Amino acid sequence: MATIREFSLNYGAEVHVVHWDTKKLTPFQHQPVNKVSFYGRSLHSIAKIRELAVQVNPDLVVVSGWQDKGYLQVARMLKKKGVPAVTGFDDQWFGTFRQRGASSLKFYLKLYFSHAWVSGPYQFEYARRLGFKKSEIVFDLYSADLSIYNDVYNESIDTKKKRYPHRFLFVGRFERIKAVELLVKAWHKLNDKRKDWELQFIGNGSLKSFLQTQTGIMVHDFMQPDRLKDEITAAGCFILPSRSEPWGVVIHEFTAAGLPIICSDVCGAAPVFLVHGLNGYRFESENIDSLVEQMLKIINCDDQKLVEMSDVSHQLGQKITPSLSAANLLSIVKG
């Protein structure tokens, strides 16, 4: 959303967004933005989307992934007219049977797309295997809204220098894929080694009732960013223990906010925003002992060290910005 706002506010672009408005994973609410129009996918047939594309006559079209057949039809129609058609994706290359099958259909994908817009280095590898030339790939698909998370850092760092908060924080979906139950088990395994540290969960999902039955943790409902600020200020380390996490923009958000990070080694954003041992730690996905080990490193840090890690996180959080994200995409049009 921050990048979309950038197109409008700083480039004066008119943006039309057709989006999936059902089966959303989180109840995030977008705010109205000048020159940006939103269209619910459930309310628009393929024919209606094609009509919209003809009416708008865009200079560029971006499609998230390649699963919606209606979107693909529009992309191909516009590509035939010479409009750059871009597929944006955050998938990592694992060499699975399905991915190898997709990579063997390079010609098929190029019928629809002229370029790929990827989130990071792992996704660049996938784009290359899908047949896109290096010159047809641009970076920084996702950006945190730094106007929010930089403010959190700037408003809290002086307080943290006086008394650093000893609280681990998870923000996300309460689902098995996020390994929230693994984090709970690690927390219980720490036992008295926790010292004065706390653990807080913020989000929603099918494992909410499970979390609410656990002792020694705090559980709160999903919050919009403006309400989340106070909770980030009260936190000392962000943990993302996911079993699968193609990117994880939340890592970008919390580094910008100045939190040290612990995340599993499957998180796609980690190579960009986390330097192991400098502003946090990575652990082996699904390995509870590995997670406990990294949590202990944070717990046993003195507060001065944690403040230093906080500063580094904030610096790393500036590596991608909404402005850079928008500029990367628009470089396709500018040639």
Image (cartoon, helix red, strand yellow):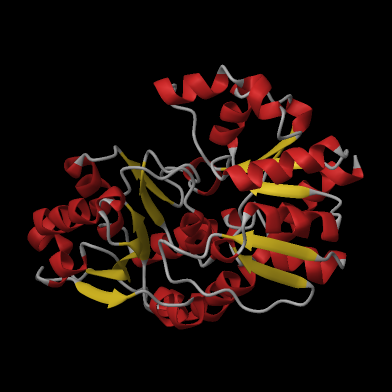
Residue appearing at x 54%, y 72% in the figure? 153
Q: Position of residue 2 (x, y in %)?
A: 65, 66
Q: Position of residue 305 (x, y in %)?
A: 40, 59
Residue appearing at x 23%, y 62% in the figure? 206
Write down the quadrant of residue 145 in the picture: bottom right
Whether residue 134 appears in this view of the structure is yes
- Of residue 138 and residue 199, the one placed in the foreground of this image is 138
Callout count: 0
**Outermost residue toward the right?**
334
Going by the image, does 132 lie left or right of 261? right
Whether residue 118 appears in this view of the structure is no
- Of residue 199 and residue 210, the one placed in the foreground of this image is 210
Is residue 266 positioned above or below 41 on the image? above
Going by the image, does 239 lie left or right of 278? left
**Outermost residue toward the top?**
104
Q: Position of residue 291 (x, y in %)?
A: 24, 46
Is residue 239 positioned above or below 131 on the image? below
Q: Position of residue 13 (x, y in %)?
A: 84, 64
Residue appearing at x 72%, y 68% in the figure? 5
Residue appearing at x 69%, y 59% in the figure? 48
Write down the quadrant of residue 230 in the picture: bottom left
Which quadrant does the C terminus fall into? top right
Which quadrant does the N terminus fall into? bottom right
Going by the image, does 309 lie left or right of 301? right
Write down the quadrant of residue 213 in the picture: bottom left
- Of residue 213 and residue 158, the one placed in the foreground of this image is 213
